[in-house]
Amino acid sequence: MDLKPQNILLTSINNPSLKLADFGFAQCIKETAKKNEVRGTLLYMAPEIFCEGFYHPSCDLWSIGIILYECLFGTTPYGQITIEKLKEKLVAMDEEIKLPSTNEISKPCAALIHGLLKRNPSERLNHEQFFSHPFIDLDHAPSAQSLDKAAEYLKRAPQLESLGKLCEAYDCYLEGLNHLMAAYNCKFECLLTL
């Protein structure tokens, strides 16, 4: 895929859905594939595509890391440099991408960016790790199941408390509250669409 901000569309201001566009270069790849040509946008391209022509599902995760970096810091990791300098940076495998010290971001967010922008694809986060990452936190995303999840945790917490398992009870109360907030947000989003 050619993942870049220009190919990410939001459907509306109220209750937006995210859509991907421009599948001109898209192919279904299950494992690593060697291609004779390099396709995509150099600024968002994984180093292994440019350097070796290797396409792997983790290449898209590199692109997501670059996009997230740009959303947070207003520029890509390489900023405003020439195409030749960008090519040099992609080839420099020992150079780690650093986060700007001027912007404070949470530790989970920084860990996600670092995990996505590993130059070696075998060290980069895989899709399962990406979707289960604490910064992404899909488990607490507002959904129709949020209230049921909250009720489950809030029912279990007093039971743990009565057994003297106070730390576990505390964690259950927190999880219940997190899911209650997600349920509230889900209900609020539903009201916005009416």
Image (tube, rainbow, N blue to C red):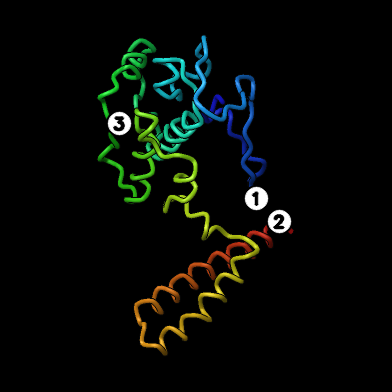
Left or right of 151, for residue 177: left
Residue drawn at 64 percent across, 20 percent down = 24
**Location of the N terminus (image quadrant):** top right
Disc 2: which residue: 193
Where is 97 relative to 127, above or below?
above
x and y, in percent, of residue 154 in the image: 51, 79
Q: Quadrant of residue 97?
A: top left
Residue 14 marker: 1
Q: Amino acid at mark 1?
A: Asn
Residue drawn at 38 percent across, 35 percent down = 124
Q: Amino acid at mark 2?
A: Thr
Left or right of 98, for residue 189: right
Residue drawn at 61 percent across, 24 percent down = 26
Which badge, 2 or 3, comes first in the chain's sequence?
3
Which badge, 1 or 3, comes first in the chain's sequence?
1
x and y, in percent, of residue 7 in the image: 58, 29
Of helix, strand and loop, which one carries label 2? helix
**Classed neighbour count for the residue bearing mark 1: other residues with Cα under 10 Å, few (<14), some (14–19), many (≥20):** few
Of helix, strand and loop, which one carries label 1? loop
Disc 3: which residue: 97
Q: Quadrant of residue 21?
A: top right
**Label tally:** 3
Q: Amino acid at mark 3?
A: Ile
Viewer-nearest residue: 45 or 30: 30
Whether label 2 touches label 1, CB < 8 Å: yes
